[in-house]
């Protein structure tokens, strides 16, 4: 009368996985080593190096002149 309804004293059945652990682990490692598709700027690639209008020697000369 005071017990909870729907509660069973039987042992829970063992869970049966449909995939093996090795396969899941391989997928997890591959996902961890790949790019994050949800990251900001995903797929934009690396920013190109823009050539400066002043070479290094000229920039150093300007810095020393200050």
Image (tube, helix red, strand yellow):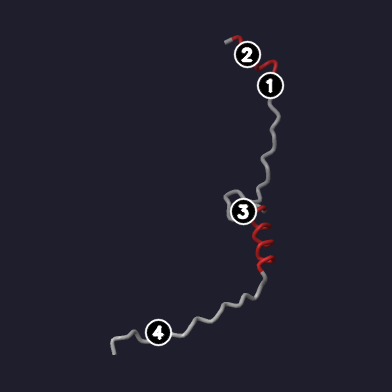
Estimate the spatial distance between the alpha carbons at disc 4 and disc 2, rounded to whole Å: 83 Å
* Secondary-structure class at tag 2: helix
Mark 2 Cα shell of 10 Å, populated few (<14), some (14-19), many (≥20): few
- Of the residues under marks 2 and 1, which one precedes in the sequence? 1
- Of the residues under marks 4 and 2, which one precedes in the sequence? 4
Q: Residue at x 53, y 82 (%)?
A: 13
Residue placed most toward the observer, 64 or 5:
5
Q: Which residue was labeled with disc 2?
A: 62
Which residue is outermost to the bottom?
1
* Secondary-structure class at tag 1: loop
Say whether residue 63 is left or right of residue 50.
Answer: left
Q: What is the number of the mark on residue 36?
A: 3
Q: What is the number of the mark on residue 30?
A: none
Looking at the image, residue 7 lies above or below residue 35: below
Q: Which residue is drawn at 62% across and 53% down?
A: 36
- Of the residues under marks 2 and 3, which one precedes in the sequence? 3
- Of the residues under marks 3 and 1, which one precedes in the sequence? 3
- Residue 4 lies in quadrant: bottom left
Q: What is the number of the mark on residue 7?
A: 4
- Residue 8 lies in quadrant: bottom left
Q: Residue at x 64, y 76 (%)?
A: 18
Could you say where residue 38 lies in the image, as x and y percent from the top left?
Answer: 58, 55
Say whether residue 55 is left or right of residue 4.
Answer: right
Q: Are marks 2 and 1 in contact (CB under 8 Å)?
A: yes
- Residue 55 lies in quadrant: top right
Could you say where residue 47 lies in the image, as x and y percent from the top left?
Answer: 66, 40
């Amino acid at each position: 009368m005071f017990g909870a309804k729907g509660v069973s004293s039987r042992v829970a059945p063992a869970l049966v996985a449909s995939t093996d652990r090795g396969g899941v682990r391989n997928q997890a490692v591959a996902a961890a080593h790949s790019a994050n598709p949800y990251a900001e700027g995903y797929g934009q690639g690396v920013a190109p190096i823009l050539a400066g209008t002043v070479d290094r020697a000229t920039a150093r000369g300007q810095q020393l002149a200050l």
